Amino acid sequence: MDKSKLHLQGLKYQLSSHFLFNVLNTVRALTRKDTEKATNMVTLASEYLRYALHKLDHFETTLSEEKTGINLFLQLQAYRFNDTILMTWNIPENLLQAKIPSFLLQPLVELVYKRADKDENGGQQIALEARLKNENLFLSVSCPKCLPGKEASGAFVPKSDVEEGVERVHILLQELYGNKGILEIIKTGNAKKIQLQIPYET
Amino acid sequence: MKSKLKAIIVDDEPYARAELAELLAPHSQVELTGEAGSLTEAVELIETNKPDVVFLDIEMNGENGFELLNLCDIEFKTVFVTAYNQYAIRAFEVNAIDYLLKPVNAQRLAQTIKKLGEQVSAEHEAANELPKLTSDDRLLITLSRKMNFIKISDIKYILAAGDYSELVTVNNDHALVQRKMREWEVQLPEKNFQRIHRTTIINLDFVDKIERYGKENAIVFMKGVEKHLDISKNYLSELKSRFKV
């Protein structure tokens, strides 16, 4: 599969049914129940759509821009499920402008969000960490407290739509970086981490 | 429709449940009796409420709505309500009444409810019109390509097989019959026959022994049959109250 096809698939995934039509459905419910929330959600959804469509013309993005998109996405999810999502960003200042392929991180965040268990205050904790090691960029998304998981450590086998999104990332990494692009799931106790490694570029 | 259609909604999104409840409200023939946010909640709700219809989301927080159909012991109609369109064929395979896409179109939902009402009342009527059978009545049934008259009292047990059922006789002959479990339930003499599971009706005269299995379930061994049959939680309590000493 070539790069542009994978790129288009990335966009399609990000706007696909599990997201767009569910968001519209929530907005419709909110217009009856809570107009202020409905208004906010339309604004968020518009910003998110603008962000995603902008990426259509750009194969690459920066970590900083991806962070903006993911924050919008998580706010929309929090509205949909009435959840409190506690997102921690551990990206060192010098890596914010690092170049990464578009549509790379959101599927990972979505998978971890689906697996994150609620803490004692009802919040779901997710952390995204970036670090540089031997000219390789390591990006990982993790939940300290995850629901008892289905997947084992190691190789990734997709089963649902969200998992297929992650599988697409896996294929993209192989296509772009060959054996220098790595995606893996690391489990330690109740914590789960999905990590990818790509060559560092600025 | 004489009686109302009892309905429940299963969806992991609270607003999606609220929206569907709102859309169902104008339909007075539908009575919404509960909502569930997960499969575990749904199974419990279905067993207590015994709904006629379940409006079921498919992809829910790591769970798949299709699994509900295997987890439940009670028969109900399914209407899938989802933002995905790729499950439609599979929905058709499990005999779903309808497949609605989110956000749900109100006119489309009205068609679903019409269809639902027609099917449920047709099934009730068909079942009620069936004649009651007694133990010494006979049915003409094809066993291993040979037709024969089978006495009702010679039926050992019956297993569900989609719209058909599999009948096992005193001689352990098997026959596939075009009749649903619900129809058998109406027709067979209550004194001798008992439903013990969504998929099983037994003739009490052929029970060899019953063994408890865990806290709420049991298994039954039929005379001359090696394989046991499952008794579900619901039917076990029905059996207990029916035959308590």
Image (cartoon, helix red, strand yellow):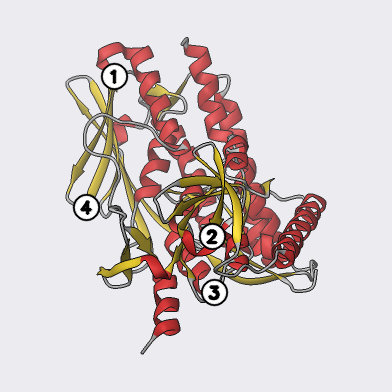
Which is nearer the N-term, disc 2 or disc 3? 2
x and y percent of residue A55 in the render?
55, 25
Q: Quadrant of residue B222?
A: bottom left
Give the structural element (helix, strand or loop) at label 1.
loop
Q: Are marks 1 and 2 on the same chain?
A: no
Q: Residues within 10 Å of mark 1 (few under 14, many from 20)?
A: some
- Say what amino acid the circle numbered 1 marks: Gly
Q: Is residue A152 left or right of residue B36?
A: left
* Secondary-structure class at tag 4: loop
Q: How far separated are the C-alphas under marks 4 and 3?
A: 52 Å
Q: How far, Cα to Cα, is label 1 from label 2? A: 71 Å
Q: Please tell me whether residue B82 is drawn above or below residue A37 in the rendered image.
A: above
Name the residue tied to disc 2. Answer: B151
Asked whether the beta carbons under mark 2 and mark 4 sit within 8 Å of each other, the answer is no
**Which of the 4 image quarters holds residue B189?**
bottom right
Task: Name the residue carrying label 3.
Answer: B190
Other residues around mark 2 within 10 Å, as few (<14) / some (14–19) / many (≥20)? some
Q: Position of residue A62 (x, y in %)?
A: 42, 27
Q: Give the residue pinned by disc 1.
A: A181
Q: What label sits on residue A190 in the rendered view?
A: 4
Q: Please state which of the two labelled residues, at mark 4 or mark 1, is closer to the viewer.
A: 4
- Establish whether labels 2 and 4 are both on one chain: no
- Does B149 sit left or right of B103 as displayed? left
